[in-house]
Amino acid sequence: MESLFSLRGKVALLTGASRGLGQGMAIGLAEMGAVVIGAGMSDMSDTRKKIESFGGTFYEVKIDLSNDHAAEQLVSEALSLTNKIDILVNNAGIIRRADAENFSDDDWFEVIKVNQHSVFQLCREVGKHMLENGSGKIINIASMLSFQGGLRVPAYTASKHAVAGLTKSLANEWGSRGVNVNAIAPGYMITDNTSQLRANQERNQYITSRIPQGRWGTPEDLKGAVVFLASEASNYVNGHILCVDGGWMSS
């Protein structure tokens, strides 16, 4: 049974690895033996330090996923480091908050480009490599707002609905060819993206009261989910959106 969850000999490419959920998942993958390539614009030295502290291997590629051709460049650089990519985790994302009637086109397109367009591009480019090899695990990061509407985040909500749909579409196309495509939908997590919500005492109390486990999630809460979907333990799981939400969706 232990071997089902082992990632030894595997290479994982993970976007947004510098902190928060991305860092938590990167550490979890490395703890199970994967070589991790972190990609993003921010300083990833803290993630590197934590992974190397237990003998793990971490590479980093600095890249702005909102740029044209960033996906092709990232995949090329990643393959030059390790010669293969067994696992892709599309975690990088941004959020902009404003009343819908005042939401600017600039904010709309910025969010869609990073959260939706770059996810498709990376799935496509890494997918080509995985299909050639006849195996691979793609894990997109969805959201509770892949199911719900949210407030004051129209672009984020639209992009996360799209991530859920894209996950199912690619799973249909690639499942029979050895590539599993799934998603994790984190609940309300303690990250930079939720700092405004947590600072609003009324909203914070309301959200916490609706979570059956009575607390916000942490990056460590995603470790098990990402390892499961990246490992052989999930070989017959495809097109699934796994909620890691403390029971939010059931409440």
Image (cartoon, grey):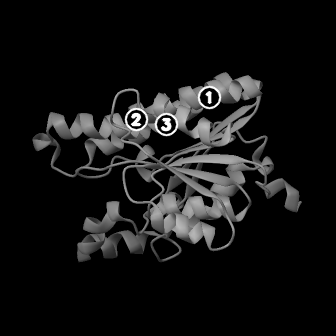
Mark 1 and mark 2: Cα distance apart in space: 16 Å
The disc placed on residue 74 is 3
The residue type indicated by label 2 comes to Gln
Q: Do labels 1 and 3 touch, CB within 8 Å?
A: no
Dot 1 corresponds to which residue?
Answer: 127
Identify which amino acid the numbered label 3 is placed on.
Leu
Q: Secondary structure at mark 1?
A: helix
**Which SS class for mark 2?**
helix
Q: Nearer the viewer, mark 3 or mark 2?
A: 3
Q: Residue at x 34, y 46 (%)?
A: 149
Q: Residues within 10 Å of mark 2 (few under 14, many from 20)?
A: many
Q: Nearer the viewer, mark 1 or mark 2?
A: 1
Q: Horizontally, is 249 left or right of 101 in the view?
A: right
Q: Earlier in the sequence, mark 3 or mark 2?
A: 3
Residue 116: which numbered mark, if any? 2
Q: Give x and y (percent) for residue 30.
A: 66, 61
Measured from the top left, where is residue 175 in percent x and y? Answer: 72, 28
Q: Is residue 172 left or right of residue 59?
A: right
Foreground pick, 113 / 33: 33
Position above or below: 140 against 202: above
Q: Is disc 1 in contact with disc 2, using a CB cutoff of under 8 Å? A: no
Please tell me which residue is depicted at 55% across the width and 27% down the height of the picture: 125
